[in-house]
Image (cartoon, grey):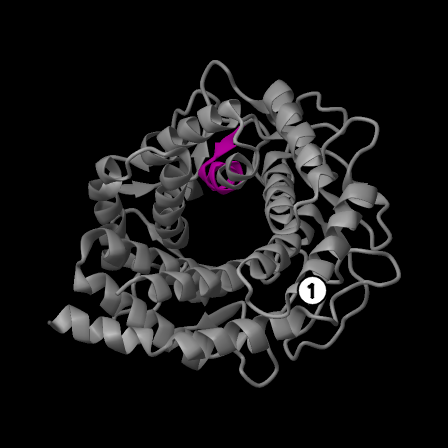
Amino acid sequence: MLAATAFGQVKEQIPRMEKALKENILGFWLPKTLDTENGGYTLNHGPDGEAKGPGTKGIVTQARQVWLFSHAARGNFGDRKQLLDAADHGYRFLRDKMWDKKHGGFYFEVDTAGKPLRPGKNMYGESFGLYALSEYYLASGKKEALELATRLFDLMEAKAHDKESGGYIEQFEPDWSPRAATAVNYLGDPAGLKLMNTHLHLLESMTAYYRASRSPLARERLIELIAIQTNAVVRKGLVACTDKYDRDWTPRLEGSYARVSYGHDIENVWLIADACKAAGVPVRPYVDLFKSLWEYSLRYGYDAEHGGFWYRGAFSRPADELEKSWWVQAEALVSALYMFRLTGDAKYLDVFAKTWGFVDRYQIDWDKGEWWPEVDKRLKGHGDKADIWKGGYHNGRAMMECIGILREMQ
């Protein structure tokens, strides 16, 4: 009865979430971030949403915006034509300016007009390219988008898939030749490492690509990624995930590598569940793992007073990076509802309610639009609203997922 009462109270928040999605998030990005001169999106806005100049364009956020507008159109979260037009605007920039016409794949970063600045191929970025193309096809039905997604998938298979150890080699030169293992990749890590973070996003992009293509090989890779994200990246003694690995999945735990990102662990839970649904495999064998990952993050990373999760911390110690990032809160909201739906345990609903209360009060800038990148321990929001790493994908996706789950559940 208590869970039913709490769930009813949470469902009452749907109109507020719809307002956050349509007015605060989509209303911030459209139409002002559409670069009508050069194509793509201008993502370079200060704390008040003020334009800070053209900025450069990275595959990560350009693709994430295509995904955002495509998914919103597919779910009828607003004016479908406006959303599809915005998605098509970004898709054409990916296709015409960011796609390497000689070697294939997406440049990691270009200038505002599309001239390559960092032309190498990084699997974190390529993954978001695949995610965007797949979702745009699902929203628009344009076969050329699926064809380009398949060309990218085939390149990833031929050049990056590690047939011996599983997963993907991550950093390449522009011609897809491997970058020296000791060089620094575009994410700031040694190029020879495999990252939990990269493979987490490969999981979501492969989920979308399989839904779009129904490719048997994509399903194989999706199941392989589920195995990686439920086993290789999990430190069994904690139970929590770490980020850095040698090519054979030997964990690297020296120095700053021995840390836990609560947001990634919680995000991992719901992305695995969604991947299982897409692949048609049971999710129940992983629920015990999900509970353990959540228990660790609740014990060390959760702010029980105000709601929400801190950023990171050392093993088996309270968080010591005491910021609340917008993306961490967004993923926590979705994952908490997934866990409530899987387990029926009201504690996840309580976490959802408290975290949403925190987000509504402190993370969302209801006055100037969008979410603050960070809220500090004094409950003060700060940072630029848009840049080469921050778009509307995490929080926009969270609102769409949460609204959808709450509407479906009785």
Task: Pick the residue in front: 33 or 311.
Answer: 33
Residue found 59% across the figure and 43% down from its top: 131
Return the x and y of residue 390 as percentages of the image width and height: 61, 60
x and y percentages locating residue 253 in the rendered image: 38, 35
Residue 27 location, x and y as percent?
63, 75
Q: Main secondary structure of the magenta part?
A: helix
- Residue at left 77%, top 71%? 52
**Residue 261 vs residue 392: left or right?**
left
Up-down relation of residue 83 to residue 251 (above or below): below
Q: Write down the residue under mark 1.
A: 81
Residue 238 position in % (x across, y down):
24, 41
Q: For the point 26% across and 45% down, which residue is it?
A: 290
Number of callouts: 1
Span shown in magenta: 193-206
Residue 24 lies in the magenta-colored region: no
Mark 1 falls on what kind of element? helix
**Looking at the rendering, which quadrant does residue 119 occupy?**
top right
Residue type at mark 1 is Lys
